[in-house]
Image (tube, rainbow, N blue to C red):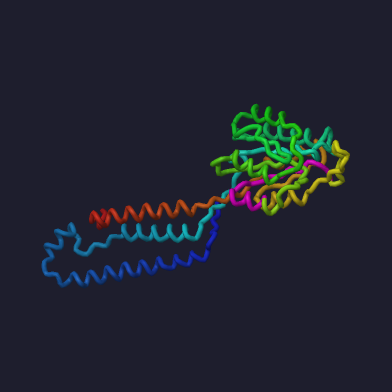
Amino acid sequence: MMQASFLHPQFLLLLLSIPIFILIYFLGGLYNKRRSLVFPNFEAMKRISGGEIFSRNFVVLYLNLVIVGLLVLGIAGMTVVLETRSGSFSYVFTIDNSESMAATDILPNRLEAAKSFAVKFVDKLPLVEIGVMGFSGDAIVMQELDASKLKAKMAIDNVNFGDVSGTNIYNAVIGANEIFGTRKMKSLILITDGQSNVGGVDKIITYATKRNIIINTIAVGTIEGGKSNLGVISKLDEDFLKALAFNTGGRFFSAQDAEALDEIIFEFEKTITNVSLNISIYLLIGSLILLLFNWVLYNFRFKTIP
């Protein structure tokens, strides 16, 4: 299913110029016809026009209408919304490896549970490109985009606790975008307890939406929390992760225990995501190409196209 939306819908009012354009075209043709009637040599006119004394070139009219339509839609910022399934995306798994992921409210600990989920998820995915990152206070690329599931799973297994303290989710999203490169269909799988202490949620959402990154969040941990290696109680921040997912077109999932991760995979496989593609630049380029084509026709006097 496909839907269209517009960033600047007020410019759609310019479409009202199309019937005015048609009216001017026919009035101009009528005026030229009346003026031509005073020309006495119809035989000469016949030879010039190729057999039609009063020719209506509807091809040129249609071409100009298409140009006007494309220009208006382009200026209005036309965006196409498509329903897309999981196999159309490139994926980057970003796994939180900060100190809070050592909490044991999910056995054996949050990090191992997150890695186990990521490996199972990779096995369930169709043949797509997969990248892997680990992040704490900084973000480390473990695997660039690759269609090899074996490489992805090996990269996930190599994610260990980070050396830099903190949980910088904003930096992780930036790193994931660099991995995606020029890909258009970008799905980020963020596996974390949501204990972000660098970069606010609004800043992350703004960055992701401007770059068409869909963030799916997997909450690993419990509301009650669990003790980390430092003896600190770390609680799950569901609100933070829900805000990231819902405001970027993704899904939020919560895993209270390792077994629940299998249910998440099943639910994710059924997910259909709406993806917005801004096609205004292509419409504007198309209109410019047609304008050039129209100019060539006019200047080479191909004014009547059979």
Q: Position of residue 67 (x, y in %)?
A: 39, 58
Q: Nearer the viewer, residue 38 or 240?
A: 240
From this view, report whether residue 1 is shown above or below residue 90: below
Q: Is residue 257 left or right of residue 75?
A: right
Note whether 280 is above or below 254 in the view shown. Answer: below
Q: Residue at x 64, y 28 (%)?
A: 151
| Number of dots carrying numbers | 0
For the question of whether residue 104 can be seen, the reply is no
* Horizontal side of residue 272 vs 22, given as left or right: right
43 sits to left or right of 30: left
Q: Residue at x 36, y 67 (%)?
A: 21
Vertical comparison of 260 with 22: above or below: above
The magenta stretch spans which residues?
204-222
Q: Position of residue 39 (x, y in %)?
A: 14, 70
Give yes or no for residue 217 being in the magenta stretch.
Answer: yes
Front residue of 183 and 252: 183
133 within the magenta span: no
| Of the pair 48 and 280, the residue shown nearer to us | 280
What percent of the width, then of the height, locates residue 172? 67, 42
Look at the image and tell me whether residue 45 can be seen. Answer: yes
Pinpoint residue 220: horizontal percent, then vertical percent.
78, 41
Q: Residue at x 75, y 50 (%)?
A: 240
